[in-house]
Image (cartoon, helix red, strand yellow):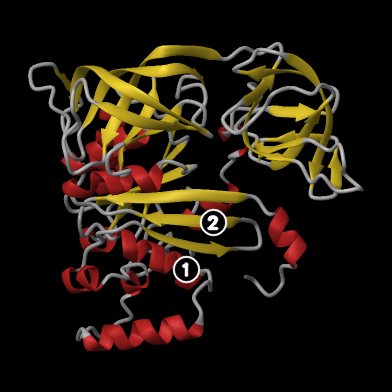
Amino acid sequence: MDKDITTSAYLDMELLRFTTAGSVDDGKSTLIGRLLYDSKAIFQDQLDAIERASIKKGEDYINLALLTDGLRAEREQGITIDVAYRYFNTPKRKFIIADTPGHIQYTRNMVTGASTANVALILVDARHGVIEQTIRHAYIASLLRIPHVVVCVNKMDLVEFREEVFSSIQKRFMDFSTHLDIQDVRFIPISALNGDNVVDRSVKMNWYEGPTLMYLLENIYISNDYNQLDARFPVQYVIRPQTNEYHDYRGYAGRMASGSFKVGDKVKVLPSGFTSTIKTIDLWKEPLESITAPQSAIITLDDDLDISRGCMIVSAENGIRQGQDIDLMVCWLGEKPMISGGKYIIKHTTSDLKCMIKEVKYKVDINTLEKVYENKSIGLNDIGCISIRTTKPLFFDSYRQNRFTGSLVVIDEATNVTVGAGMII
């Protein structure tokens, strides 16, 4: 933590989550290392360890990629295999970075790292331009509804910092991204190895007039990334102290998935459908007048209703969809292929229920973005559109409308392994 930031100020700082994606050896880990190094977010012992590892590898410079490539296999091959998370802050924001692998066989790792991101950094090697992996990663960013995409054209030092190279890649990316659902796309020419336009502005690319990457990450507007219209409060736990001081206290703990509530709001409790009014909103022993996503708190109601984990409190005026037959896009994470007609468990917000795979509608070739109707087998890292039927009604929004109530995970009921990530259509 920055020495000049108090604990209270740190806790109140806005959090931005971002993920990196790109083909193998495009410089993702080096970029993150450069961000941390130039923003002085690396401890001295970490820096010393990186220097020793760099010397051991016979390199005459500090290999900042080693900061995130923690697995021995990653360091030996010079690639990222697992998702590496790093945390740092500047005086303006807190950051959580998910450094995801570039290999095709690790697509599931990118989905995991990008599922909660506000920003996706897609790296493109300036020498190679837009390739199939670039299209793949842009499609996944679009599928996961990541609000902001920043295309970092890396290794500009290897193409003599030429503006026409950057402009060509920018045009190529925009040409195919018009077929995707990406709302905000930015482009930055960088050299992660040398630090050009990462934290400090490059003197070698005076033709570029946009922000540096760090400036963009510190200032990009993310308050509208959360759905603030549809009030959704999945109940995680029922608080019953049963002490003399709180003898009749009955509160419902959880986190606002979207929207906001304030004391006095009329609400509906699902699945019962009963309505009530918010009596209090508590945070530990501190009463609040309101709560906004993604805050956590305890809500009490004027009426004694049968509410338990898995229930959802929503606005009385703002309805939510419900049903048992649901279509969704799924990224398959399991080693075993999906079984059409098979039975699985799904976890949706705080609710667990069983389902059956009714139909595989199509599979997506994410190298060409085409829908495949002939071969519908869904295996590891495949993405497809499926239809499921749940054993009881599910209360949900579409993923396009709400990333939290529109997402779910699929679990193998025999092994309890998470085998799929689903986005409700």
Q: Is 33 placed left or right of 14 in the picture?
A: left
Residue 4, given in percent of the width and then of the height, sits at 72, 72
Instruction: Name the residue type under label 2.
Output: Phe
Picture quadrant where residue 93 is located: bottom right
**Rendered view: 180 above or below 69:** above
Q: Residues within 10 Å of mark 1 (few under 14, many from 20)?
A: many
Q: Disc 2 to disc 1, how far (Cα)?
A: 11 Å
Tag 1's secondary structure? Answer: helix
**Viewport quadrant of the C terminus:** top left
Instruction: Name the residue type under label 1.
Output: Leu
In the image shown, does 222 or 332 lie closer to the viewer? 332
Residue 314, given in percent of the width and then of the height, sits at 66, 21
Q: Which residue is mark 2?
A: 95
Q: Residues within 10 Å of mark 2 (few under 14, many from 20)?
A: some
The residue under the point 22% across, 51% down is 23
Q: Is residue 150 visible?
A: no
Residue 26, given in percent of the width and then of the height, sits at 24, 57
Residue 277, given in percent of the width and then of the height, sits at 81, 20
